[in-house]
Amino acid sequence: MNDMVLLAHGDGGVLTHELVRDLFLRHFPNRTLKGLTDAAVFTGLAGRLAVTTDSFVVSPLFFPGGDIGKLAVCGTVNDLAVSGAGPVYLTAAFMLEEGLPIADLDLIASSMARACEEAGVEIIAGDTKVVGRGHLDRIFINTAGIGIVPGALDLGYERLAPGDRVIINGPIGDHGMAILAARESLDFAGRLVSDCAPLNGIINELLREIPREVKMMRDLTRGGLATAAKEIAVAAGCDIHLEETAVPVRPEVRGAAELLGLDPLYLANEGKFMAFVSAPSAEDALAVLQTHPLGRSAAIIGEVSGGSGNLYLRTPFGGTKYLDMLVGEPLPRIC
Amino acid sequence: MKELAKFRDPQIAKALIKEVNAVAARVAERLGRRIVLMEVCGTHTVAISRAGLRGLLCDHLDLRSGPGCPVCVTDYADIDRMVALARLPGITVATFGDMVRVPGSGSSLERERAAGAEIRICYSPADAVAYASAHPAREVVFLGVGFETTAPAVALSIKEAARLRLNNFSVFVTHKVVPPALDALLSDPELKIDGFILPGHVSAIIGLKAYDSLNARGLPAVITGFEPNDILDAVRQLLLMVLAGEGRVINGYARVVRTSGNTIAQQQMDEVFKITDAPWRGFGTIPRSGLTMEDRFKKLDALERFVLPPTKSRVPSGCVCGEILKGKLTPRECTLFGRVCKPMAPVGPCMVSSEGACAAYYNFERRQRGGTAVE
């Protein structure tokens, strides 16, 4: 095989076949995909189904705690999981820039395979395109996913009610800070590692224990905790009150963010979700989350009240701040 | 970080807040109106907002954001020049992050980046020198924006570029110095500000002597740090001075600020820059309030190095940020407020900064319509 991606890898000819056979099928060896048919035909999914799609354009491609491949699997798995769906199948489309080292593509595909195994999903359809140098940044990946929502499960904004508790499964800002540090080669003492992880396992346990008392869930990605909470408050037509002291943030993330003038509440996450749970079940939910490796430092961070779409943060000093959505990318401040 | 703990301790903060509110009630009664204190520095503004202090002290006291956000006070014409530089072929503009969104009269660096300009966000001017050194085919222009806190590092990077004989690095200097802007505010006889929270980092560089003229005016002023309890203690000291009818500059940040300031940083600045008149967004030109490069570094001055197409800066007339900062007008009395001047299309510095008086007013009123009122 060549050592780098050529335009000819995307022309549907010999090199395309070679790439699919020797690289993708090696990492994703399932029967449906092996057929190399125009569409994956399958049976076995019945009832309420959930479908989602997401595109991944992260730079750098490899960062502490993950890479674009792991992200592409976890991102789609997590979107299904927070919707209450058990993810089953994924599709993956690769857009490649000519000149991308095949070794990098191999690493990315093997990382996707590992993430699929961890999440218990299979990639059953795929596509590869190659564009000329400079037309995209090395590799973009789109994944779509399909999952099954248990029939009795009822999640949605409309279920939020005053008094519901907001629970998060761990510290915020790890992914955003890790990416920024890797992108800019920032030399911080202590390691900043992305939290990129499939959340369907931990969410499955939560829904198994208290299926009725979980009102809705949201994974925290771009825009961070504050943007996600604000979106929910607006969509649900209620107010959300967060306690700053209750929100877990790793000291190294807090320190790096402070140095750069960034707010962890607005930093990206790839392995965190918040769950809205009725007050009497909040402690039970917390206990379930804390027994899972991805929820060791889960915490109750706030609650819902009647209102009109406002998000408030109570500071350790007793002040209350109004939080809005992130405006533009987080930029380091000059002073 | 541990030694900072007491400056963030919520218990100490709560006691301070209680004391401040009690003194503020007495001062407000004595004055027969609300008290107005100005935090001069943008970093104080952010720290106050982070801790949610404004809402905790708002019974009798307005904390007003001053002219100390360097990005916010960068003049239209200067941003238009930055945009013009970014449009030149082969140029990489290197800048601190928060500069990219500030609009000039036609565009912003953010828009130019979308249109194809190469804009690199740097964490330090040394990064820009390193980038220029590694990319000899690019012309790297660093945007020297900021007060006495950033100017010394920029001065160092200019000297470093000269030492390396880099012929593809230059700096567009719009540095400003704080005390003349304060003097300009204070020289208005109708000024309605009862005291100043003076910047900690700037003061650490310039020292106490730089505030001689402020001291002579007899207004209460406290230099302080950026932790919540630093700020609360400064407010407490200011109120006690107002109550006692005293006015002088107190150094409440003695753990960092020395009388003589940081003489090494001052030397670096003196070596590379000289004082000049400078335009401040919303204020007009303030005499001797800016820095420009000394002649022997002219080769590294972007404005000497590149011929920019003539730009006509169209500044919407009627901006009264200067008057708002002096406490003479409220944002609603500005004819541009909410119509021409909005957070997404700001005219003056009070709207550019999300914590500026006008942006705060704009958002507050929106929230009033939406629900509960908090900070």
Image (cartoon, rainbow, N blue to C red):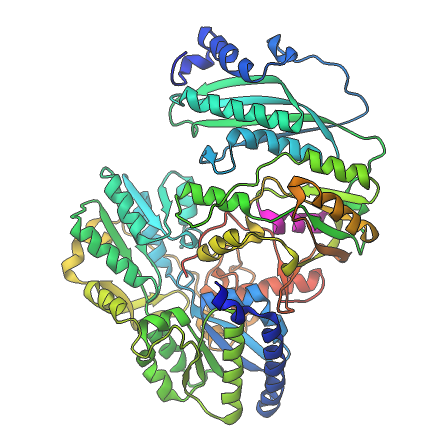
Q: Nearer the viewer, residue B170 or B237?
A: B237
Q: Position of residue B22 (x, y in %)?
A: 63, 85
Q: Which quadrant of the structure image shows residue A244?
A: bottom right
One can see residue B190 in this view: yes
For residue B354, side relative to residue B252 (left or right): right
Q: Residue at x 58, y 71 (%)?
A: B54
Q: Is residue B318 above or below residue A229?
A: below
Q: Nearer the viewer, residue A163 or A7?
A: A163
Q: Is residue B51 above or below residue A223?
A: below
Q: How many marks?
A: 0
Q: Position of residue B4 (x, y in %)?
A: 49, 68
Residue at the top extreme of this rendering:
A14
Q: Position of residue B197 (x, y in %)?
A: 46, 76
Q: On the rendered image, what quadrant is the N terminus of chain A found in? A: top left
Q: On the rendered image, what quadrant is the C terminus of chain A found in? A: bottom left
Q: Position of residue B196 (x, y in %)?
A: 46, 79
Q: Which quadrant of the structure image shows residue B176?
A: bottom left
One can see residue B334 in this view: no
Type of secondary structure dominating the magenta stretch = helix
For residue A247, side relative to residue A98 (left or right): right
Please state the extent of the stretch shown in magenta in the rendering.
A223-235
Q: Magenta stretch: residue A160 in it?
A: no
Q: Magenta stretch: residue A234 in it?
A: yes
Q: Residue at x 28, y 58 (%)?
A: B154
For residue A1, side relative to residue B62 (left or right): left
Q: Is residue B214 above or below residue A87?
A: below
Q: Is residue B222 above or below residue A253?
A: below
